[in-house]
Image: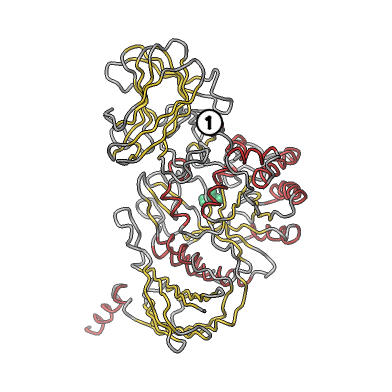
Amino acid sequence: MRKFIALFVALMLPVAALAEVTTASTLTADANVTTVEMSDTLYGLFFEDINYGADGGLYAELLQNRSFEYEDILNPRVTDHYNGWGFNLAFGATGTATVQTENPLNENNPTYMRVNCTKGEYRFANLGYQATTFAGGIPVEEGKTYRCFVWMRNAGDFDGQVEIALTKRTGKSLAVPKRFTLTNEWQKYEVTFKAAHTEDAVLSFIMHGTGAVDFDMASLIPADAYGADWPNGGLRADLVQALKDLNPSFLRFPGGCVTEGSYYRENFYDWKDTVGPIEARKENFNTWGYMQSYGLGYYEYFMLSEAIGAEPLPVVHSGLLCQARDVKEAPLTIAETHEYAQDLLDLIEFANGDVTTEWGALRAEMGHPEPFNLKYLGIGNENWDQVYWDRFDILYKAVKTAHPEITIISSAGPVAEGDMPARAWRTIRSKYPDTIVDEHYYMDSAWFLNNVDRYDKYPRTTRVFVGEYACHEATQPNGRRPNNLYSALCEAAYMTGLERNSDVVVMASYAPLLAREGMQQWTPDLIWYNAREVLLTPNYHVQQMFASTAGDQVVASEMDSRNKLIYHVVTRTADRLYVKLVNVSAYADKMTVNLANVPDGMGAVTCLTGEKNDINTFQNKERIAPRTNEVTLENGALTIELPAYSATILTFKLK
Ligand code: AHR
């Protein structure tokens, strides 16, 4: 009986106790024996306006529905022009706020708000994102400056002035307000605010006088936004920094499904709607259930790419609405696709054309006369079957004929395995072998670990872009798939396979990139944020650690270990050697690393570890974060401990 109890207790040992078991392993590599040249564009970013990634996210605009164009996603013909605004906020005032379309600001911005004050000081305000009836608002910081503008017009009989004020929810002033007398023409009125307190504020419009005034296109952007001098007013500086810190070599944009649009043809992402003066950009509803102001448009994507040192990689739709969705309208006909090809050529002209060309001139006018040096173009996102290839062929040929220098990205569909990607690959190999093939997969941890060798088996002549991937763990009671340490480590393990095969896998990007806390449509996501703070996930740290130590050649290496859940890859540049070791097991390991042709001396060890299911939160942002220490290589060897559930990178100087 005793024996039985002892056995029972042993079987019930918690994981923490098991973690004390340690294996001993050896890794051997010679820095002078290399296998493949690595792609210098292996690690990059995929940005899509999902989870309020653009408006309410990367785009620094603090107002929501600034132009009264809001539409309902499920039925875009149903509008919600009042979204984000509060009307008739002053006690004792009376008046109306009605949506108008006659004589708009411009044809791309068709609706505006006519506010008619009949008594008192009629007041209305924009509440920003995530405000409830009594709480939340526009996050302003004490001492910080905010640039504001709005287009207004006296509708004919207004006899007073309009005051623009940055205020508390109670209406109490937070900065010096400004009053304007209006003309009968649309005109832009500007004011700069310096916030007296840190506060959840509102941008208020107060009518001193009676009669009607037309309002459109308001904006409030921090003066220290990244790219504050760009036509759109700039991007959220903390998020741009987080992107830059990932060392991205390319930026894929603007989607994803957003590129294709859902349901209706008017939802195709038309890059031309997103450039030029922001008050003339034609807003569109977003596949993910909200509105796109296009304040973050193609010009800004190119500017952002340049700012973070990444090759721009736009993806245009292929004439198909999102195939994975319940498409309600037919794709472009073959004849329409031939016409649409011109849009792609125009895009290349916008990016690279001389300033004397139509689209090159627009780029120059927007502030960037030098070309953006576009090299890549994706045609289609997650598309498949003949309906795609018929259109792809037209677009591919149009681009290649005019611009043989552009590398085209083709689609292998939305799934990792099976007949669909197999058919796509057959078409690509026979007809478009010069394209880089975009593969997408969101799979569970077991799949990632079982497929670390996926690209060992690919023909060496093919080139793959893993355009979207992430490890999806089971959905938690809070309805989210977690960004926990284990998912990040399974991705890290998989990435050792990407590096080892980086002659074939020339690009890879985690997806999705951004999510606003509480406004997400998809989990997990690489970077989270709320109105004021940024939260980096364990998955972010893995991407950052790998991308900053990618190397340009793979070094042959061998591991001897009883622990089959330790993954590794060794790479080098001219002057650095990197050893990556990913332990996805519950067991620590004493790892001896033997390195030939690496000078003895100091190196660095960076380690990301914690409990298997740990996540970072806004309350505890650093729970999972990499720590770096010094190590010493002596007689070509060192022994380190690989903790249970860890990703470790050793860096040594070669010169
Ligand atoms: O990354 C989220 C979505 O996943 C993308 O929009 C789409 O390409 C994929 O299905």
Is residue 282 placed above or below 563 in the rendered structure? Answer: above
Give whichever of 340, 57 is nearer the camera: 57
The location of residue 345, given as percent across then percent down, is 71, 44
Looking at the image, what colour scheme do you see?
Answer: secondary structure
1 sits to left or right of 75: left
Is residue 66 placed above or below 303 in the rendered structure? Answer: above
Q: Residue at x 43, y 50 (%)?
A: 239
Residue 562 shows in the view: yes
Give whichever of 321, 215 is nearer the camera: 215
52 sits to left or right of 321: left
Residue furthest toward the bottom? 635
The location of residue 150, given as percent across then percent down, is 45, 27
386 sits to left or right of 163: right
Ligand 1 lies under 8 Å from the Cβ of mark 1: no
The location of residue 187, given as percent across then percent down, is 49, 23
Q: Residue at x 63, y 47 (%)?
A: 370
The location of residue 312, given as percent across then percent down, is 59, 52
Residue corresponding to mark 1: 279
Q: Quadrant of the N terminus?
A: bottom left
Give whichever of 285, 1 is nearer the camera: 285
Crowdedness near tag 1: few (<14), some (14–19) or many (≥20) residues, C-alpha within 10 Å:
many
Q: Amino acid at mark 1?
A: Glu
